[in-house]
Image (cartoon, rainbow, N blue to C red):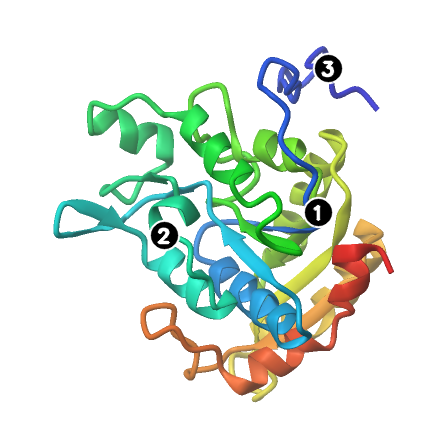
Amino acid sequence: MNTSGDNASGFDFDVSRWPALPRLPGVFVTGTDTGVGKTLIAGAIARRLRRLGRRVEVFKPAASGCRWSREELVSADAEFLAACADSRRPLRQIAPLRYAAALAPNVAAARAGQAVDLAAMFDAYRRMEGQCECVVVEGVGGLLCPLSDEFWVIHFARMTSLPLVIVARAGLGTINHTLLTIHAARSAGLNVAGVVVNRYRTDGAGGDDVLAAATNPDQIAARGGVPVLALAPDSPECSVERATVGQDVQFAVDQADWERIVFGR
């Protein structure tokens, strides 16, 4: 597999120009798109690992759409992840790059007149070494979302060497989006642990979209050659802002063997 940057697509997945990161046990949660609920699923995974007795930490390399609190930007996603993991680390270390504009990080940084401080991001990640048994990393947008002009989420995923969990939509269009994400991940040499289908509906409402949701998981598993780890239902009990994970969603996520995925046993 060519990951040197010489492939015909022109995408450069080479990370040798950046300093190596520690190899921590854990998972890297990405999405097929923005708004698919990867923060919720990442939090549910962290909560499951914590309830299994693991010392788990959480990390989000960059966050957009942050709010001002006193004199610094605060990420609601980082607050939610910290609550799920029962983390006591400062939020600025959980989400080291934070921007007010709800845009791709490189664009948000440019609009704020800032350089993207990748060194600060790497340093925050390194600080978790020896402080936890495992880490749940949540990416930004999808794998090809740029953190800086030359450094994307997929580069950071490659540097961590964590097994990848892809959060996908349930309805129409998700087969294409999910298979494209799997293809991009494998093109970069990433290990795809599986897919979580989020906001899965079984109430019979919605016509063709519900029929698509019922058949999509088998299609994703068969065409993508990956396991579907969970079907997380659409639940009004879930709220990142209120730091709540619905019982049905948590139950669905709990059924995956996270000990095996995270620790290889």
Q: Amino acid at mark 2?
A: Pro
Crowding near the residue tagged with mark 3, few <14, some 14–19, many ≥20 C-alpha atoms within 10 Å:
few
* Nearest the eye: 24 or 34: 24
The amino acid type of the residue labelled 1 equals Leu
Q: How far apart in space, not on screen, are marks 1 and 2 (Cα)? A: 36 Å
Secondary structure state at the residue bearing disc 1 = helix
Query: Nearest the camera: 90 or 163?
Result: 90
Q: CA distance from mark 3 to mark 1?
A: 22 Å
Instruction: State how far apart marks 2 and 3 are (Cα).
Output: 36 Å
Q: Mark 2 or mark 3: which comes first in sequence?
A: 3
Find residue 90 and name its label.
Answer: 2
Disc marking residue 166: none
Mark 2 lies on a secondary structure that is loop
Rendered position, 215 above or below 187 = below
Q: Is residue 211 visible?
A: no
> Which disc is residue 179 wearing?
1
Residue drawn at (32%, 53%) of the image: 75
Report if residue 128 is visible in the image: yes
Apparent side of residue 160 relative to residue 71 in the rendered image (left or right): right
Q: Nearer the viewer, mark 2 or mark 3?
A: 2
From the viewer's perspective, is 265 left or right of 204?
right
User: Which callout, 1 or 2, points at the residue further toward the start of the chain?
Assistant: 2
Residue 258 placed where, x, y %?
74, 65
Element on which disc 3 rests: loop
